[in-house]
C-alpha cells in the first residue's frame, strides 16, 4: 500500500493521449479529423526522438568527458556512483527536438526552454532519477560542461528535465539531449521516431470527470482503428503491476503468518498433553485450577512472545534496508513516511499475535479443567 501510494503520487499527469506515427504524422491528423475528433483535442503536437547519426571515421558519435570528469571529482556517494555507472560505458543518448518538448512543458504549465544553436538541455526519465542524483547533476550543469555530438561542440545548460515524453511509459531514457530543431534534423538525418501527443480540450471535459471523458474517447478511437495510448490505459497498467506484486506478497505473508502461529499453538498444546501425568500429580498435591491456568498463561506468553519480539525488532531494521535497497530512486525521499506505515503494520501484526495467544490460553485452560475431574478408581 505504501509503495502504491508513492508510485501514484510520483506520476505527473500532463498528456491524455499519444498516437505513434510510423509514417507521416499528418496521416494520423487526417484520420482523426475524418473520424470527427477535430474538436476533441485542445492541443495536438509532435514529439520527435531520434538517434545520433554515425560520425566521421575515428570520431565518436558522442562524448561527455567534461561531465564524467566533474562527476569523478564529486565526493563519493551512491548517487555519484550510479551516474558514473550509467554513463561511463560509451553511452550514446537520444536527441529530442526542442519545439515538441517546449509544447509539452507548456501543457504541463512549466516554463519553456530557450537554447542557442550550440546549447543543449538534459532530459532524464524519472525511473533513473532521484532527489540526490538530480541535485548532483544539476550542480554539474551549473558549470555549463562541454559535450561533443558527432564531433561538434555543445554546452549543457539549464536543469535536468523529467517531464515524460509520452503518455505511456514505453520510452524510458536514462539520458537524452534536447536540442534546437535545426540541430536535431542535422544530427539525426531523418533517423527519428515521431509521437503525436494530445490533450483533451476543456469543452470535452465539461460536465464529466477526466476518466469518464477519456473512457468515452477510447471507445470512439477503438472503433476507428487508429492506434493510440491513453492516460486511462497507462493507469490500468500501473495498477495491474502494483496489484500483481502486492497480491502475491500479501498472500504469502498471510499464509506464512497463519501457518507459523498454528504450528506454535499446536506445539504448545501437544507438549501440554504430553505432561498430563505431571499436571495430575500437581492436582493431587492440591494445586488449584487457577494456579495451573496462570502458570500455563505465563508459559504461552514466553512461548509466543520471544519469537514475536525478535521478529518485531528485526523487522524495523529489515524494512528500512528493504526500502532503501529495493525501492526505485524516486521513492527514496518518502522512506520516513513509509517507515511509519510499516510500523503501523508491525503493530497490527502484534495485535494478531495477541489474539492467537488469547485463543491458545483459552484452549490450554479448557484442557486443564478436564484434568480436574477426578478419575474413578477400578
Image (cartoon, helix red, strand yellow):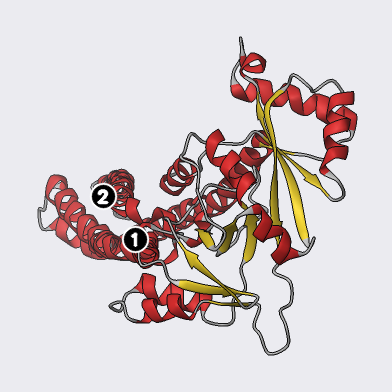
Q: Position of residue 285 (x, y in %)?
A: 10, 58
Viewer-side label of 2, 1? 1
Outermost residue to the front: 117
Please state which of residues 371 and 272 is positioned toward the viewer in this rendering: 272
Q: Position of residue 326 (x, y in %)?
A: 44, 64
Say which quarter of the image contains residue 14: top right
Please state which of residues 210 and 35 is positioned toward the viewer in this rendering: 35
Residue visible at 57% across and 48% down? 164
Say which quarter of the image contains residue 306: bottom left
Say which element carries label 1.
helix
Q: Is residue 228 visible?
A: yes
Q: Position of residue 200 (x, y in %)?
A: 66, 25
Q: What residue would you read off at disc 2?
A: 368
Say which quarter of the image contains residue 198: top right
Rate crowding at label 2 as few (under 14), some (14 to 19) or many (20 or more) other CA atoms within 10 Å.
many
- Above or below 376: residue 149: below
Q: What residue would you read off at disc 1?
A: 135
Q: Is residue 62 left or right of residue 326?
A: right
Outermost residue to the bottom: 58
* Mark found first going from the N terminus, 2 or 1: 1
Residue visible at 44% across and 78% down? 66
Amino acid at each position: 500500500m505504501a509503495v502504491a501510494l508513492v508510485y501514484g503520487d510520483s506520476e505527473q499527469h500532463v498528456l491524455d493521449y499519444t498516437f505513434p506515427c510510423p509514417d507521416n504524422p499528418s496521416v494520423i491528423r487526417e484520420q482523426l479529423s475524418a473520424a470527427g475528433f477535430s474538436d476533441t483535442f485542445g492541443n495536438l503536437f509532435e514529439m520527435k526522438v531520434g538517434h545520433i547519426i554515425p560520425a566521421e571515421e575515428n570520431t565518436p558519435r558522442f562524448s561527455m568527458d567534461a561531465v564524467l570528469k566533474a562527476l569523478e571529482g564529486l565526493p563519493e556517494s551512491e548517487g555519484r556512483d550510479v551516474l558514473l555507472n550509467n554513463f561511463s560505458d560509451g553511452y550514446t543518448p537520444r536527441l529530442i527536438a526542442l519545439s515538441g518538448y517546449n509544447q509539452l512543458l507548456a501543457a504541463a504549465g512549466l516554463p519553456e526552454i530557450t537554447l542557442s544553436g550550440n546549447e543543449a538541455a538534459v532530459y532524464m526519465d524519472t525511473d533513473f532519477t532521484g532527489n540526490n542524483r538530480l541535485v548532483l547533476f544539476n550542480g554539474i550543469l551549473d558549470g555549463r560542461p562541454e559535450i561533443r555530438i558527432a564531433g561538434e561542440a555543445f554546452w549543457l545548460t539549464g536543469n535536468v528535465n523529467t517531464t515524460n515524453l509520452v503518455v505511456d511509459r514505453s520510452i524510458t531514457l536514462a539520458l537524452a539531449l534536447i536540442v534546437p530543431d535545426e540541430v536535431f534534423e542535422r544530427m539525426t538525418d531523418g533517423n527519428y521516431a515521431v509521437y503525436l501527443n494530445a490533450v483533451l480540450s476543456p469543452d470535452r471535459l465539461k460536465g464529466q470527470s477526466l476518466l469518464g471523458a477519456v473512457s468515452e474517447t477510447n471507445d470512439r478511437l477503438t472503433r476507428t482503428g487508429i492506434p493510440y495510448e491513453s492516460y486511462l490505459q497507462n493507469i490500468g497498467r500501473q495498477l495491474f503491476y502494483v496489484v500483481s506484486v502486492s497480491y502475491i506478497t500479501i498472500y504469502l505473508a498471510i499464509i506464512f503468518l497463519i501457518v507459523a502461529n498454528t504450528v506454535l499453538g499446536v506445539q504448545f498444546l501437544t507438549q501440554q498433553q504430553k505432561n498430563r501425568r505431571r499436571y495430575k500429580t500437581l492436582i493431587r498435591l492440591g494445586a488449584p485450577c487457577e494456579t495451573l491456568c496462570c502458570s500455563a498463561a505465563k508459559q504461552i506468553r514466553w512461548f509466543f512472545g520471544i519469537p514475536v519480539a525478535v521478529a518485531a525488532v528485526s523487522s524495523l531494521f529489515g524494512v528500512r534496508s528493504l526500502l532503501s535497497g529495493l525501492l526505485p530512486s524516486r521513492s527514496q525521499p518518502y522512506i520516513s513516511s513509509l517507515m511509519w506505515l510499516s510500523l503501523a503494520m508491525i503493530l497490527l501484526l502484534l495485535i494478531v499475535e495477541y489474539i492467537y495467544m488469547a485463543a491458545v490460553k483459552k484452549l490450554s485452560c479448557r484442557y486443564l479443567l478436564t484434568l480436574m475431574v477426578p478419575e474413578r478408581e477400578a
